[in-house]
Amino acid sequence: MSTVAVTRLVEAPVAAVWRVFTDLPSRCERLSTVIAVELSTQGPFGAGTEWRETRTMADGAEITEEFRVDECVSPQRFVVSSPGIGAEYRMTYTFVPVLEGRHRGGTMVTVVQDGTPTAPAGRFLALVFGGLAARTVEGALRRDLEDLAAAA
């Protein structure tokens, strides 16, 4: 299992940051690598929400992934899972208001991605490419946080 965590200050109140991060239909406009979002469920963002998202990778290839919200405590935290090829991923987003100091009124956003191999090939790839994969995931998470922070 590998874990990657990224934290970023967003100069906006928690409620505004939450709205940006949970507005699935707008992900194409807000995330520089997302080219399509297809909602599989109706209604407001919350536990049980499902969608498919297509992204452009660094090498120009496109990848489509399915996501499901497993837990949601508005506006503090949500957990999203995604079945991958040979591995399953779980991303936990937390939103903490900054109450003191020069960034008062802002929000600290942390995303933690845990990956668990589910097949022998996934375990082998994790062993061989573990460090490289973690750096790639960290870069992608940082880019997403930057894009969403700019939108907030």
Image (cartoon, rainbow, N blue to C red):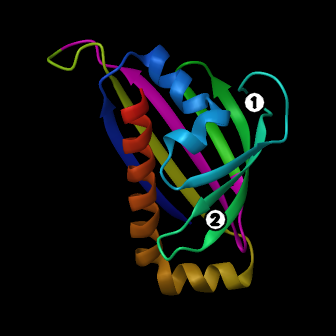
Within 10 Å of disc 2 (Cα), the crowding (few <14, some 14-19, many 20+) is: some
Marks 1 and 2: CB-CB under 8 Å? no
Q: Which residue is mark 2?
A: 116
Q: Quick one: 108 or 10, which is closer to the camera? A: 10
Q: Which residue is mark 1?
A: 47
| Quarter where residue 126 is shown | bottom right
- Left of 64 or right of it: where is 16? left
Q: Position of 104 compared to 126: left or right?
A: left
**Mark 1 packing: few (<14 Cα in 10 Å), some, or many (20+)?**
some
Identified by mark 1, the residue type is Ala
- Give the quarter of the figure containing the C terminus: top left
What element does badge 1 sit on? loop
Residue bounds of the magenta highlight? 82-100
Q: Residue at x 28, y 12 (%)?
A: 99
Q: Quadrant of residue 115?
A: bottom right
Question: Which label is found at residue 110?
Answer: none
Looking at the rendered image, the quarter that the N terminus falls into is bottom right
> Residue at coordinates 45% horizontally, 47% vertically from top-left?
144
Element under disc 2: strand
Residue 143 on the magenta span: no
Q: Residue furthest left?
A: 102
Q: Is residue 101 above or below residue 122?
A: above
Res. 46 image quadrant: top right
- Residue shown at the point (47%, 71%) measured from the top left: 58
Q: Between marks 1 and 2, how big is the CA–CA gap? A: 21 Å
Q: Is residue 86 left or right of residue 19?
A: right
**Residue 150 at what x, y percent from top left?**
37, 34
